[in-house]
Structures are given as structure tokens and as C-alpha cells.
Amino acid sequence: MKRGAVWVGLVVLVTSNLVAQGDPRSRLAGRVPPAVAAAVSLLVDSAQARGLPAGPLVDKALEGVVKGVAPDRIVPAVRGVLQQLDAAATALRTAGGPRAGDDAVEAGAFALDAGLTAGDVGEIARAADRSYPTAVALQVAGLLAALGVPRPETVGLVRATIRSGRPLGDLVNLPSQVQAAMAGGSPPAAAAAGLERAAAAHQAPRPRAQGKGQGNPHKP
């Protein structure tokens, strides 16, 4: 995935729940070719039947039209989004904990599209809690991967930052910090490794029995 597309994708991911209220298929009317609208509507039905968020499917179709993508390429791209949403939802279920919300599933699909694996999504989900929501952690991980940070360093950095007990804003700012280090000449992996070491040095102990829904005991 190109970096510019990644940032656009994150904006779509963050806002999709707001703009896709009601029937997401209504957003297709008059904006995509009728044949594409019909095919995407079937995929929306499939997503809803599986309990998956359908807004990203419509977003992808509209994105294709805006970019001038040929109609016969839009539907396969939308189908790919559905597959990623399904894979993300499966990874989150496997990770355990309460049922993942649509925002976490969408963030997981975003991370998969950026190059992470289902196992990576599960690891990050298991590290997350109320103070560090799964959706936010996965969005950050997806951005790090899209910047070129290798998978192991991406997962390690996100997990170390969560375990450090630092404010949520520190987690959100990781991509910007990596970019700043890269601008100074550091390779993505080295930039992430340096940040991970710094987070580990400030790591706060967390009770072994703490569950995902209990939040971080070092937060007020």
C-alpha cells in the first residue's frame, strides 16, 4: 500500500462509523455504475449477515469511482476489503475478550492491509485494554507497518508502549515519532527499535490477573 493511500485509509477508518449511519447501500445510489452498486450491495448483505461492518465496503467502492478505477476492478477490490474484515474479526475472536466492536474490526482490517498478519492483530488485541483501546492500537500498528516498520518491530513497539503505562497520546504519536527519526536518517526498523527500548525502560508492572476490561491500574 502506498503511504498516501494509508493516510487516506485511516481517515476513512476513523470516520466511517459517522458517515455510514443507516443503510450503507443508500450511499451508492447515483454515485457508482448500477452494475457495481448491485454487486456491492450483495457484498454488503454478506458482511451484515456475518456481523461485519459494511461501511468500509461502500467506502472502497466510492473511492474507486473517485479515482477513476474501471468498474470491473472495483468489485474485486471491495471483495478484498470484505475478506480483510472477516480475517480481522476472526483474529480478534481468537484473541479472546469481549466481542470486538466495528471500530476494532475495521482497524484490524486496516492493519492487515498495511502488511500485518492475523497473528499480529491478535497479539496487539491481547495487549490492549480500556486505557489503550484495541481499535487505536491497531490503527497505530497499521500506520507503523505502512511506514515501513517490519512486523516484529511494529508489534513490539505497540506492546511496549502499552505496557509502559504512558498516556494514550504517546501511543497515538508513535507514527509521527518514527517519521521524525526516519527524516533524520534512521531506517524504519531502527527508529521503532529505539522507541521500543525507551518504552521498555519506563515499563510499569501490571498485575498478572488483570483482564482486558479492567483498564490500566497505573491510570487514574
Image (cartoon, rainbow, N blue to C red):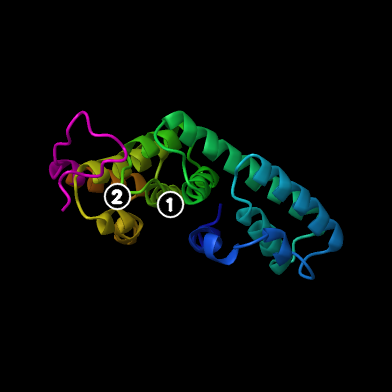
- Residue 8 appears in view: no
Q: Which residue is mark 1?
A: 139
Q: Is residue 193 left or right of residue 36?
A: left
The relative height of residue 27 versus residue 185 in the rendered view (above or below) is: below
Instruction: Name the residue beneath numbered marker 2.
Output: 191
Q: Residue at x 51, y 47 (%)?
A: 114
| Part of the protein shown in magenta | 199-220
Q: Quadrant of residue 204?
A: top left
SS of the residue under disc 1: helix
The answer for how far apart the CA atoms under marks 1 and 2 are is 18 Å
**In-image side of 129 versus 10 (left or right):** left
Percent across and percent down for residue 20 are 60, 62
Q: Is residue 17 left or right of residue 199?
A: right
Magenta span includes 32: no
- Do we see residue 3 in this rendering? yes
Q: Is residue 77 left or right of residue 180?
A: right
Query: How far across and down, in percent of the image, does residue 168 sit?
Result: 27, 55
Mark earlier in primary sequence (1, 2): 1
**Which residue type carries mark 2?**
Ala
**Nearer the observer, 174 or 46:** 46
Label for residue 198? none
Residue 202 in the magenta stretch? The answer is yes
Total marks shown come to 2
Graded by Cα atoms within 10 Å as few (under 14), some (14 to 19) or many (20 or more), the crowding at tag 1 reads many
Of the residues shown, which amino acid type is indicated by label 1? Gln
Percent of width and height locating residue 40: 75, 53
| Residue at the outermost right position | 35
Kindly report the secondary structure that dominates the magenta region of the rendered protein: loop
